[in-house]
Amino acid sequence: MSTTKPCHIPSLVKKYLMAISGLVLVLFIIGHMLGNLQFFLGPDVINAYAFHLHHLPGAPVTLWLIRGSLLAFLAIHVWMAVLLTKENRAARPESYLGQKTLASTYASRTMPVTGVLILAFIVFHILQYTTRVVPEHYNETIGTAMIEVGHVPLEYFDVFAMMVSGFSSPIISLFYIVTMALLCMHLSHGVASMFQSVGLRNEAWRYKLKCLAAVFGWVIFLGFASIPASVLAGFGKDYLAEKQAAWAGAAPAAETPAAHH
């Protein structure tokens, strides 16, 4: 009676898969941050950006293919991280593990925990700003705004108002900021380790790459955290109040588009 042996992935392949998937996710994070920062340019800009994002050639299939690909890269990244962690622990004697723990950074020791928390945040973030069902049904509470597309005025879901409304909650904003801090700690360690995984980091470059990774992490953190922090400080509140008053006085039959952010 024959038994099927589990598929064995060579260590080098695991490292390359983790590095490549990590690079794709890092590039997405940079693009996502730059897109979100258009929030500071006002409702016209961020709403038009959301419209174009959801009207890419081939939409909505294109957008769901992008989302599916990102989730696949995320799954590969987490899978390789788990496999490599198990492999490293199995290959090291207990005494070495104790010494390694003392020498390792806080970021590297907490990578599994931060990874789980970041995954939880991703789920919440999708529910809040993609499906728009938490903490309220935004498609029912947030109306439309006028945007200009190709010099043609049209009505579109008010993404700016939704972001102001969502980040007006101190609990949600704090959760967002803390998670971004964990993400950027994860990124700083991950970006530095990525070079080592593919054999591009040597002793001469170790400190420089570590510093560059730390700067990168801070830039990403400040970029993302600045949005909820600014809303808590009052940015966009007057706009939201005016829009809510206008929507409340609008005809009950008015409907809002169901496009996703």
Image (cartoon, rainbow, N blue to C red):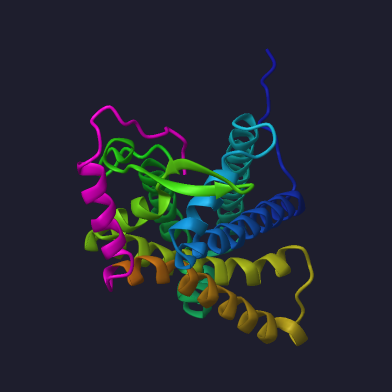
Residue in view at x 27 percent, y 71 percent: 234
In this image, 132 relative to 38: left or right? left
Which quarter of the image is occupied by the N terminus? top right
Report whether residue 82 is seen. Answer: no
Q: Residue 242's spot in the image, x, y percent?
A: 26, 56
- The answer to whether 132 is drawn above or below residue 191 in the figure is above
Q: Residue 183's spot in the image, x, y percent?
A: 47, 63
| Residue at the outermost top position | 1
In this image, 196 relative to 53: left or right? right
Q: Residue 212's spot in the image, x, y percent?
A: 64, 80
Residue 24, by quadrant, is: bottom right
**Is residue 109 or residue 23 the one in the foreground?**
23
Residue in view at x 26 percent, y 41 percent: 141
- The answer to whether 84 is drawn above or below residue 72 in the figure is below
Residues rendered magenta in the picture = 232-261
**Is residue 254 or residue 187 the one in the foreground?**
254
Residue 156, by quadrant, is: top left
The magenta stretch spans residue 224: no
Residue in view at x 51 percent, y 63 percent: 38
